[in-house]
Amino acid sequence: MRILVQRSKKSNVTVDGKIVGSISNGLVLLVGFKENDTIEDINYLVKKVINLRIFDDENGVMNNSILQNGGDILSISQFTLYADTNKGNRPSYINAMKNTEATKMYDLFNEELNKYVHVETGVFGADMQVNIVNDGPITILLESRDKNEK
C-alpha cells in the first residue's frame, strides 16, 4: 500500500463537473493498493497518516500532526501509484490491486481514518479532477512495506 501525502491549504475533487469532496485545511492523500495488501497495511498507514508530524507548532517547526493541528483529509484512490515503468515508455499497472478488491480496501481505509479525522473522498474508479493547493509544499510518500523494515 502506498500513500502520497500532501499538506494542503485547500483542495477539492470533481466528477462530471460537480464537487464530490472538499477540504479547506489538512491533508490530501493519493492512495494506492497492490496485490496482497491486507488490513495490517491499512492499520499501519492510518496510524502513520494521523501521527505524521508535518504541521508547524507555535515555533514554526514541523512538529504537529493533523490530530494536534486540526483539519480534514481528502482521500483519492490512485492506482497509478503502482505504475511500473521499467520496460518501455508505457506504464504497466499489473502490480496494482484489482478493482473489486481495491474498492473494498479503499473504503475500509477511509472508514478507519474517519475514526480520527473527518474524511472527504473522490469516487473510486471515476474520471476525477483533483485541485490541490499544496502547503509548503510538503509531499511525503508512505509505504506499508516499510513496517517490516524497522
Image: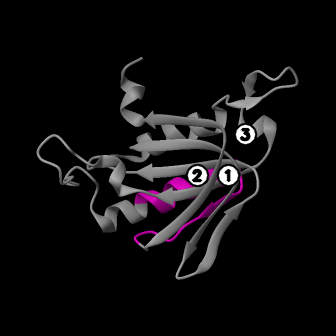
Q: CA distance from mark 1 to mark 3?
A: 13 Å
Residue identified by numbered label 2: 112
Q: Earlier in the sequence, mark 1 or mark 3?
A: 3
| Viewer-nearest of discs 1 and 3 | 3
Residue 109 locus on image (x, y percent): 51, 53
Give the numbered dot on residue 100.
none
Q: Residue 124 or 90: which is nearer the viewer?
A: 90
Residue at image location 74% in from the left, 23% down from the top: 63
CB atoms of marks 1 and 2 within 8 Å: yes
| Residue 119 position by quadrant | bottom right
| Residue 103 position by quadrant | bottom left
Please state which amino acid type lies under the numbered disc 1: Lys
SS category of the residue bearing label 1 = loop
Q: Which range of residues does the magenta coloring cover?
A: 105-125
**Placement of 45 over or under 112, stated as above or below:** above
Specify few, some or many for label 1: CA neighbours under 10 Å numbering under 14, 14-19, or 20 or more.
few
Give the numbered dot on residue 115.
1
Specify few, some or many for label 3: CA neighbours under 10 Å numbering under 14, 14-19, or 20 or more.
many
**Placement of 80 over or under 100, stated as above or below:** above
Q: Earlier in the sequence, mark 3 or mark 2?
A: 3
Give the numbered dot on residue 66.
3
CB atoms of marks 1 and 3 within 8 Å: no
Please state which amino acid type lies under the numbered disc 3: Ile
Left or right of 130 on screen, residue 127? left
Residue 142 locus on image (x, y percent): 47, 35
Q: Quadrant of the C terminus?
A: top left
